[in-house]
Amino acid sequence: MTQGLSHMTFIMRHLDKMEEILTSVLDARKIYDSGDDTFSLSKERFFDIGGVWVATMQGDPLPTRTYNHVAFKMGPDEYDDRLARIKALGLEIREGRSRVAGEGHSIYFYDYDNHMFELHSGTLAERLERYAKPR
């Protein structure tokens, strides 16, 4: 039986740049750095983001950008602060999709290696409750 999420792994050219994004924007805590050792496929670092294990590995980046993304939760009052952090790093922000009231707010942005992230203030229960109502 699947018990939940174990970890997420992202491959990128520059581990330091990704570390800056994770720690500055997502309040990640670095818990491991392989240095020059390669226990896995390449150099890697592990982070804790809100109790989720996120691994980063050095390698070739994604060739293109898509809407595939990982969303991390933020509080409803954090929107302006998080947006400012993203802008301070010069990251590309993707315009969010149209939303209906009651499904939370999102900020979509790309890292330097074509991964898309989202910061979202809503919950699944709130979204389903809103979608059950007529437009």
Image: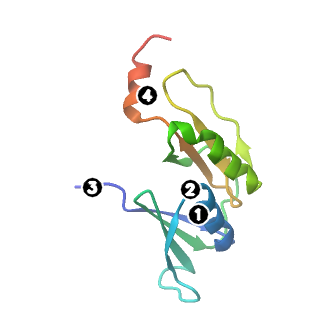
Q: Is residue 65 visible?
A: no
Q: Nearer the viewer, mark 1 or mark 3?
A: 1
- Name the kind of residue labelled 1 in the image: Thr
Task: Name the spot of residue 30 as percent of width and height, x first.
Answer: 51, 71
**Looking at the image, what colour scheme do you see?**
rainbow
Tell me which numbered mark, 1 or 4, is placed earlier along the sequence. Answer: 1
**Which residue carries the number 4 mark?**
127
Secondary element at image label 4: helix
Residue 65 is left or right of residue 38, and the answer is right
Tell me the number on the disc at residue 23.
Answer: 1
- Name the kind of residue labelled 3 in the image: Thr
- Name the kind of residue labelled 2 in the image: Leu
The residue most toward the bottom is 37
**Which residue carries the number 3 mark?**
2
User: Which residue shows up at 53% across the image and 83% down it?
Assistant: 34
Secondary element at image label 2: loop
As measured in the structure, the alpha-carbon distance from the residue carrying label 4 to the one carrying label 2 is 23 Å
As measured in the structure, the alpha-carbon distance from the residue carrying label 2 to the one carrying label 3 is 26 Å
Tags 2 and 3 touching, CB below 8 Å: no
Tell me which numbered mark, 4 or 3, is placed earlier along the sequence. Answer: 3
Question: Which residue is nearer to you in this view: 20 or 2?
Answer: 20
Tell me the number on the disc at residue 26.
Answer: 2
74 is higher (above) or lower (below) than 44:
above
Q: Is residue 120 visible?
A: yes
